[in-house]
Amino acid sequence: MPAPYTLTEIHGRRAGLTQSNRVGLLGRFFDVTMAAATDGTNKTKVTFQLVDHEGNSVAAVRTFLITLSDDATNGAGLTATTASGAVAAGASGADIGALTSKKALMVQTNSSGVYILSITDTAKTAFTVVANLWDHSSLLTLATANYG
């Protein structure tokens, strides 16, 4: 949690108020971090890691929705562009199902709290990757340099 905040112990868990006056439980999944990297010719991988309010990694299996958007500001809507190749789980995590082919996936992290999305696209599209969580979204906009 960003300072200032006050922590209290509740049933063995540390909790406190965040800057937005929301209760945060430390060591419990709150958000995801996302990082993009090249992964071979015309491929990129986006690694999602579950984190708590302080940004600490959380080792837990959780399910959430990933969408590809054209809106780099808010991540609204689905992209009008379809990737030329696969959009699916990479080395970690699992795909639960596709809501819209190559644009919206329900995914699940592995027991370490990691999911890796692999995108193959010869156009190397600058998709905005959106992790749609319960009450907010996290965004990462890809660049041509993120593709091999």
Image (spheres, rainbow, N blue to C red):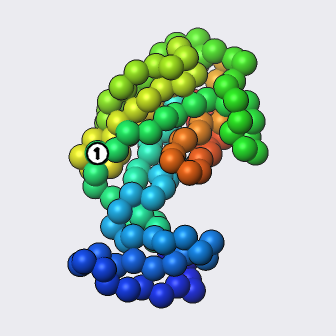
3 lies above or below 55: below
Q: Is residue 102 visible?
A: no
Q: In which quarter of the image is the C terminus?
A: top right
User: Which kind of residue does numbered mark 1 sit on?
Assistant: Val
* Residue that lies at the very extreme toward the front in this rendered image: 11
- Number of marks in the rendered image: 1
In this picture, residue 90 sits left or right of residue 131: left
Q: Can residue 82 be seen in this view?
A: yes
Write the residue at 51% across / 78% down.
Answer: 17
In this picture, residue 85 sits left or right of residue 141: left
Write the residue at 38% across / 39% down.
Answer: 63
Residue 97 percent location from the top left of the image: 40, 21
At label 1, counting other C-alpha atoms closer than 10 Å, the crowd grade (few under 14, some 14-19, many 20 or more) is: some
Q: Mark 1 points at which residue?
A: 61
Write the residue at 57% across / 31% down.
Answer: 67
Between 58 and 16, the one nearer to me in the picture: 16
Residue 137 percent location from the top left of the image: 59, 47
In this picture, residue 123 sits left or right of residue 53: right
61 lies above or below 148: below
Residue 24 figure quarter = bottom left
101 lies above or below 1: above
24 lies above or below 76: below
Residue 22 percent location from the top left of the image: 55, 70
* Mark 1, secondary structure of its residue: loop
